Each structure stands twice: as C-alpha cells, then as structure tokens.
C-alpha cells in the first residue's frame, strides 16, 4: 500500500487523507491505493506538488503518443468489431462508432 488515497467514486489520487475526505460524497468512503493504482491515477490539484502534477502530465502526453489514432471500426452497427487502424477487437460505442482508446 502507498500513502495515496482516493474516494470510492474519485478519479484523482490524493496525497492527504483529509483532502480525499473533504472531496468525497456523503455515501462514499476513502480508499488507500496500491502502488499500481497510484501510478495510473492523475494527482489531485489541491494536495500534490506542482512538480508531481507536471510529471503526471508528461507521462500522460507520452502515453497518448503511443496510442492508436482510433479512426473507427470496420462494422460500427455491430456490438463487437475491429479497429480500422490496428485491427484490435473491442466493444463498439454506438454513439461514436469507435472502440475504447487503446
């Protein structure tokens, strides 16, 4: 376990348990993150340092460069289809006609 926390509905990692507690919904809990979860989540802008936020932004930009451009799927009306660019199979989003970012 790490010294990072999140709320049960949250999408940011908090360095301070009190920061996570203040930003949670009444019916949710504060959860301590594992190392893998902490590495994947973006830092909270209120309780983490600017250097840590900049490092997370750089890592996200680097990961975005290696992703598939995801132009669409071969059969957008079907539930399952393949990406046109790389051929990865996946579930089709009916509204956008694409699969999840990959």
Image: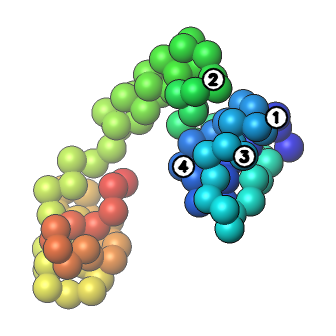
Nearer to me, 100 or 42: 42
Earlier residue among tags 4 and 1: 1
Q: Residue at x 44, y 25 (%)?
A: 57
Q: CA distance from mark 4 to mark 1?
A: 16 Å
Q: Residue at x 33, y 77 (%)?
A: 91
Q: How many marks?
A: 4
Asked if residue 37 shows in the view, the reply is: no
Earlier residue among tags 4 and 3: 4
Q: Mark 4 touching mark 1, by CB under 8 A? A: no
The residue singled out by tag 4 in the image is: 11
Q: Secondary structure at mark 2?
A: loop
The residue singled out by tag 3 in the image is: 21
In this rendering, would 12 be left or right of 71? Answer: right
Earlier residue among tags 4 and 2: 4
Q: Secondary structure at mark 4?
A: loop
Disc nearest the viewer among 3 and 1: 3
Q: Residue at x 56, y 12 (%)?
A: 51
Q: CA distance from mark 4 to mark 3?
A: 14 Å
Residue 26 location, x and y as percent?
66, 62
Q: CA distance from mark 1 to mark 2?
A: 12 Å
The residue singled out by tag 1 in the image is: 3
Q: Residue at x 72, y 46 (%)?
A: 21
The residue singled out by tag 2 in the image is: 48
Nearer to me, 62 or 17: 17
Q: Secondary structure at mark 1?
A: loop
Residue 99 disc label? none
Earlier residue among tags 1 and 2: 1
Q: Secondary structure at mark 3?
A: helix
Residue 46 location, x and y as percent?
58, 27
Image quadrant occupied by the N terminus: top right
């Amino acid at each position: 376990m790490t010294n990072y926390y999140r709320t049960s509905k949250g999408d940011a990692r908090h360095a301070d348990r009190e920061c996570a507690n203040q930003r949670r919904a009444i019916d949710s809990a504060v959860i301590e993150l594992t190392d893998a979860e902490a590495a994947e989540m973006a830092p909270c802008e209120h309780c983490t340092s600017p250097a840590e936020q900049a490092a997370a932004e750089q890592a996200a930009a680097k990961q975005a460069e290696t992703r598939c451009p995801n132009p669409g799927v071969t059969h957008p009306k079907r539930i399952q289809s393949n990406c046109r660019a790389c051929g990865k199979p996946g579930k089709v989003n009916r509204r956008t006609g694409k699969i999840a970012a990959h």
